[in-house]
Image: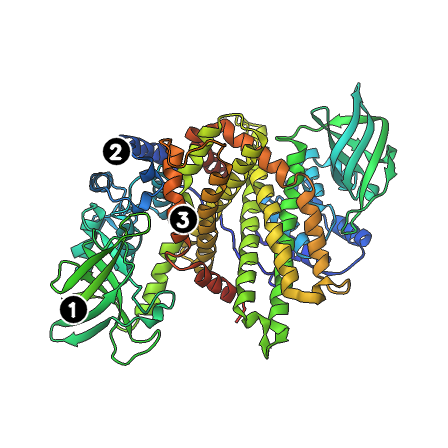
Amino acid sequence: MHMTVQTFSVETLTPPPDATALRNQVRAFITANIKRDDPRRLVNSWAVPDHDFTRALGEAGYIGMVLPTEYGGGGRSQTERYVVLEELLAAGAPVGLHWIADRQTGPLLLKYGTETQRKRYLPGIVQGKIFACIGLSEPGAGSDLSAVRMRADKVPGGWRLNGQKLWTTNAHHAHLMLALVRSERGSERHAGLSQYLIELATPGITIRPIIDLAGGHDFNEVFFEDVFVDEDALVGTEGQGWAQATAELTLERAGPERYISSLGVLLEFIRMAGPAPDAATASVIGKLTAELWTLRQMSMSVLAKLASGEDPALEATIVKDLGNLYEQEVVRAIQAATPSGFDLMGDSACAKMLSLLVQVAPSFSLRGGTREILRGIVAKGLGLR
Amino acid sequence: MSTERQMVLDTAERIFAGGATPETMWQQVIEAGLPALLLPEADGGFGGDWGDAFSLIRLAGYHAVGLPLGEAIIGVALFGSEAISAFDSRVVFAESASGTLDGGNFTGILHGVASGRTARLVLASIAGQTVGLDISGAIVTPGETLAGDPCDSLEFRAAPASLCPVPTSLFALGALPRIAQIAGAMDGALALAIGHANERQQFGKPIGKLQAVQQNLAVMAEAAAAVNCAGQAAFQAAGQALVSTGGAVKFDPEFEIAAAKLRANIAVDAGTAIAHQVHGGIGFTQDYALHRFTRRLYVWRAEFGNERFWAERLGVLTAVQGGDKLWAYLTARSDLVAMGAA
């Protein structure tokens, strides 16, 4: 077997023993707390901010589930968290506010943070009261993240920050930014970078909205002018920011959100088609379902690796690229398969979902690593250099 | 996987890579007992699970082996140890049948029987029933696939047919080996393409350094990854079906098989096109090994359900659940299968 190439090592996810009960609990919670007034919210799940929902979710113990109980976390397993996440996403629940803190900031603080940082932020994250954003991209650093220029200068008692972050999702809702910053003067590329956890209420920070082509506000530009943060703002080891940030990207790329977020429009299309669709419609549903089912298997395999302590960076990258392609294909295929007379500007749930998704779909293969960057990572994993 | 099962894979690897003629290799496979993979050790098998079956059949595909090993493994599991004692493990499937069952006797023709001429027992679906037929009484009309593998028609006259209960359609079970073979052949072709891209120099460097080539090979690798994952899951679902047929739970794995075969068929597009594109002219020659993979991939994606067949079938299975129940349906099935595998 040592001679063979297999790019994706498949591992079977063993669901938690009480998976069925857990799914039922989450489904009951969602039914009781979700607002169904606007179908568009259901296909934009992790971009929809909803304070009431997030607070209730925190109270129910569905945020920070795997964090230790001493920080207010649930002390639950990765597989239990996975079950909850996919249930939330499949239902189109509005998880935008706490999503990043739950997925990335909490685990990162647990891994690299000081005791002070953990005690200060983790309980609020778990309660759904503290939200975070990720400060990676800058005007001159998009796909080439190592071109980061935002600067941290050592000053008595802490650091002084100057620079600009761009495309920062949810900065306008977040209390915290986890930023990748150049902490060593004159350093280049991957060296001399550090991660800082910055409270966004600190003086000297300006957040400006970037409105997307569909009128939505997810992105922001964030300016830092002589912003003072104390020594506790440094996360992990000074100069190790690149390694820490890329490890964090695996968490960003490994989750089920990369293929489920358009599920709502597929379900709506299936409802519209009815129980006995014609052959052409059945064929479209069949193809989209086959890929949905396959991506779910792949996503569960990535989680199984993560849960057993392995690093599924390559597998996660593959799932993100295929997941993004799929989310875009769902939109394309369903718009192409709607019956004649279908009004994209009409009042049907399917039309409302589609009219939003066709516009925002191009962003799916841009966020969290462009398609080209992801495929470059895969090629490197294949031994092409 | 247990050490013993790893030894089975190592044995298989040596046989598949050995380069014997198909007839000799088939004999080696039988002598090594590979078709008995799924039988319990008490019955002379290896006590493997369906994940092992996927790995073994995939390995044959990885070496572009066109033998009906998957049919034999599944056939022996369905038919029991009699398939070994009475039929030398030479069990194959018919893709389609025309004819009649009269008083338990079959008269008619079976089509699309891989290696029918050297097989001893053929499983076929006739009038909604799955039956086993002793091939010794059949008239064989030899044929071959476009990849050159034997694929025959078998004619029977009033041949006794023994009933063989299956947890889903025989057609769906027949799709299982093809999924694993496609998964293996995709990775086999990918390994060739990566090797070629790292060796072939153009513009003063290996073509594998060109981003356009890298991006294409990444697409191919992702397609191969999808088939491997889908295949593994479909085999586990099939295993769940066989486990539960004796008990209270009736589990038909057609949904998972449909999804995986459809995904595999679709993946063949990217797999074959990119592998050939990367290889340039050399991959188009008879001397070079690539066509041993790609020509089989074109065959396997059509056998036991092409894209149209499984897309429509899966679409119907999905539409019956409806938009309100589909998610609960998917999760309940995968939770059940994973619990069974654990």
Q: Amino acid at mark 3?
A: Ala
Circle nearer the N terminus (2, 3): 2
Residue B114 visible (yes or no): yes
- Image x and y of residue A97, in percent: 25, 47
Q: Determine the chain carrying the residue at label 1.
A: A
Which mark lies nearer to you, 3 or 1? 3
Q: Which residue is mark 3?
A: A361
Q: Residue at x 64, y 68 (%)?
A: B196
Q: Determine the chain carrying the residue at label 3.
A: A
**Cα distance in 3D space between marks 2 and 1:** 41 Å
Circle nearer the N terminus (3, 1): 1
Find numbered disc 1 in the image and state the secondary structure of the residue it sits on: strand
Marks 3 & 1 on one chain: yes
**Cα distance in 3D space between marks 2 and 3:** 27 Å
Describe residue B198's horizontal placement relative to residue A187 as left or right.
right
Q: Which residue is mark 1?
A: A225
Front-most of B112 and B219? Answer: B219
